[in-house]
Image (tube, helix red, strand yellow):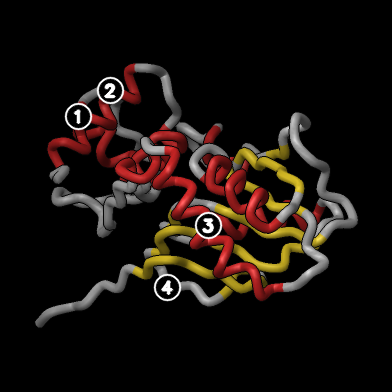
Amino acid sequence: MKNVDDLIDDAAELAERGISKGEIADELNVSRETASWLVERSGAQPADTGDADAGPSGPQDIHVDWSAVGRDSTRLTHVGRAMADLLAKEGEEVDLTVGIEKAGTPLATTIARELDTDLAAYAPAKHQWNEGDIDDVGGGFSRNFATIRGRECYVVDDTVTSGTTLTETVEAVKAEGGEPVACVVIVDKQGLDEVAGVPVYSLINVVGVARD
């Protein structure tokens, strides 16, 4: 089981490969604030004064490691089928599944196969974010996959940390003329029922319990 020191080492390795903090957050399934804190503690990059102050003990977050599923195609297929089952009741007119890169795309591939839909892929803004204001960068849909306009669709990701990426993707689908019907993830750290008016389904909800 990984501890904080392991995560700091992982963040340092990713940062030294030139990967943005947004992608590091994606790879480690943590928030952008946590990714910044891990990178700064590793010494791989200087402290970024533009990020929220995490304090000496780090931000409040939960690390999700689902690599035991991701590294095995059979396990990944079974999990994708379970996610597809959560979506199956959402309507017969849906003909597109949108995977949020990177980890959401292989899951969306299985779901698209199970539900007999086309496949689209969305790269969120955080993949370009490193320093400064994330509002200065944007995401986009890959031209190598299906188009969005005029189609009902599902949105797929692996983990909800804050809900920002899921919300961004739903709004991007709407901006392209599509109609997001439902979202699905493996793990939801926030316990979301919906984002931007679109229902969110998850296989696992993580609930924090405060103690006196």
> What residue is pinned by disc 3?
81
| Sequence-earlier tag: 1 or 3 | 1
Q: Amino acid at mark 1?
A: Asp
Q: In the displayed orientation, state which residue is furthest to the right.
A: 150
Q: Give SS at disc 4.
A: loop
Residue 182, picture quadrant: bottom right
Q: CA distance from mark 1 to mark 2?
A: 6 Å
| Sequence-earlier tag: 3 or 2 | 2
Crowdedness of circle 3 by 10 Å Cα count: few (<14), some, many (20+)?
A: many
> Does the CB distance between marks 1 and 2 fall below 8 Å?
yes
> Does the CB distance between marks 1 and 3 fall below 8 Å?
no
Q: Residue at x 30, y 43 (%)?
A: 68
Q: Give SS at disc 2.
A: helix
> Does the CB distance between marks 1 and 4 fall below 8 Å?
no
Q: Residue at x 58, y 73 (%)?
A: 194
> What residue is pinned by disc 1?
9
Regarding residue 168, the answer to whether it shows in the image is no
Tell me the tag on residue 13: 2
Q: Give SS at disc 1.
A: helix
| Sequence-earlier tag: 3 or 4 | 3
Viewer-side residue, 61 vs 131: 61
Residue 71 appears left or right of 178: left
Crowdedness of circle 4 by 10 Å Cα count: few (<14), some, many (20+)?
A: some
> What residue is pinned by disc 4?
191
Q: Residue at x 49, y 47 (%)?
A: 77
Q: CA distance from mark 1 to mark 3?
A: 33 Å
The answer to whether residue 185 is above or below residue 21 is below
Q: Amino acid at mark 4?
A: Gly
> Does the CB distance between marks 4 and 2 fall below 8 Å?
no
